[in-house]
Image (cartoon, grey):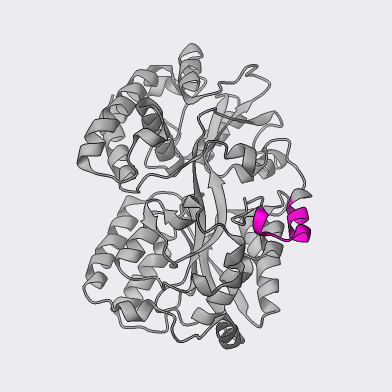
Amino acid sequence: MTRHRPLTRRRSRRVTLASVAAGAMLLSACASGAAIETAEFADFDAALEAAEGQTVDLWMYGGDEQGNAYVDEELAPAAAELGVTLRRVPVTDTADALNRVLNEQQAGRQDGSVDLVWVNGPTFSTGRQAEAWRCGWTEMLPNMEFTDPEDPLLTDDFGTPVEGCEAPWHKAQFSYFYNSETVAEPPSSLPELLEWAEANPGRFSYPAPPDFTGSVFLREVMISQAGGAEEIPLEFSEENFDEYSPAAIETLEALAPSLWREGATYPRDEQALNQLFNDGQVDIGMTYGPARLTELVDSGALPDSTRIMPVEEGTVGNASFLAIPANAQDAAGAMAVANLAMSPDQQAIKADPEVWGQFTVLDADRLDPEDRTRFEELPSSPVVPDYAELSGNAHPELDFDWVPALDEAWRESVARR
């Protein structure tokens, strides 16, 4: 994931994902569907009893200091009260975690070293193809009752059905932000943003794909040029790609001369774009992790005048999940942690901007009044509006196969311009 970071915070690495895919093809031929079921636990109470004394290795993106601190200082102590030791294993990309799982499965290990993974998008999809994830376990988790079973962000992960193979953890929303001291009237739609960029040469840019944030921007341009998210099929096909991608590529080719450094070079990633924004070289930025903007402003990594730029047509959103490998040694403990992480208590703690600021996966209408009040009383941010406002008119992610296809088209036509 993310980058990874899951796809809310993940760097894209083609070589790593290619090696994961190769491992998936090898394993899919010999994997046993029975190996990923959780029939050994009659119910969650039985799993909780088996979890006591287990050590759960949670593999997750290690580059998010707030996320690391939340797991170490909040989630791990709460897990300890259940008799479970939660150990965070930092990685630069969660494809590394899936590679470890596939390698251990290929070697016949049933006591895998990966118990839980912060995951979404391509890593989850590839793991499903290889039957690398346990499935059918999330329905046992008591805290699933607080989520909306019809929420499309929780039922599909970049076009891959979740089907009980990962537990929701938090949500993300692709967002634009601007410097309110230099942009008096920010654009209110993506077409207006492109017009603004052409009218203000050199003051806008986006990360070069395959950086995750840059890739999302390509998809948003394609959706906009098609007339809206409802106009593009979620499923990828060569026919769909040939119909909808040319307008996006042509738009970005025409935009390039108006970009920072006239499009001769692009920021390598979201962090590099943030640096340009903080240095005053560009006036508008973008992120799939708006929850982190408050902390970035507080730390001085972004200026105090940073504000979210809502767009009328909405933007793409997704969710991050926790997945359990099929051969996890401490699967019961992993189930206990996943349920704990979804509890109203932990979700409220994690949603606090001063802790991590991640958007909850829980449905407020399903919470009791006391828990609902906890979310309502969370401190507000001068930078980021609440999730309900931020996700207005949001649309789900396209099937992940759109991503590498668009990235390649951009490299061939825009980057080589």
Q: Is residue 55 above or below residue 220?
A: below
Asked if residue 175 lies in the magenta stretch, the reply is no
Which quadrant of the view contains residue 146? bottom right
Q: Extreme top residue here?
A: 199
Residue shown at 50% from the left, 36% from the top: 315
Q: Is residue 39 above or below residue 232?
A: below
Q: Quadrant of the C terminus?
A: top left
Residue shown at 35% from the left, 80% from the top: 35
Q: How would you classify the magenta stretch by its main secondary structure?
A: helix
Give residue 34's position: percent from left, percent from top: 33, 81
| Highlighted range, magenta | 365-375
Which quadrant of the view contains residue 19? bottom left
Q: Is residue 71 above or below residue 41?
A: above
Give residue 210's position: percent from left, percent from top: 37, 42
Left or right, 380 with reference to 342: right
Q: Quadrant of the N terminus?
A: bottom left
Left or right, 124 with reference to 70: left
Tell me if residue 56 can be seen.
Answer: no
Please name whichever residue, 130 or 59, is drawn nearer the observer in this view of the structure.
130
Tell me if residue 99 can be seen.
Answer: yes
Give residue 97's position: percent from left, percent from top: 42, 66
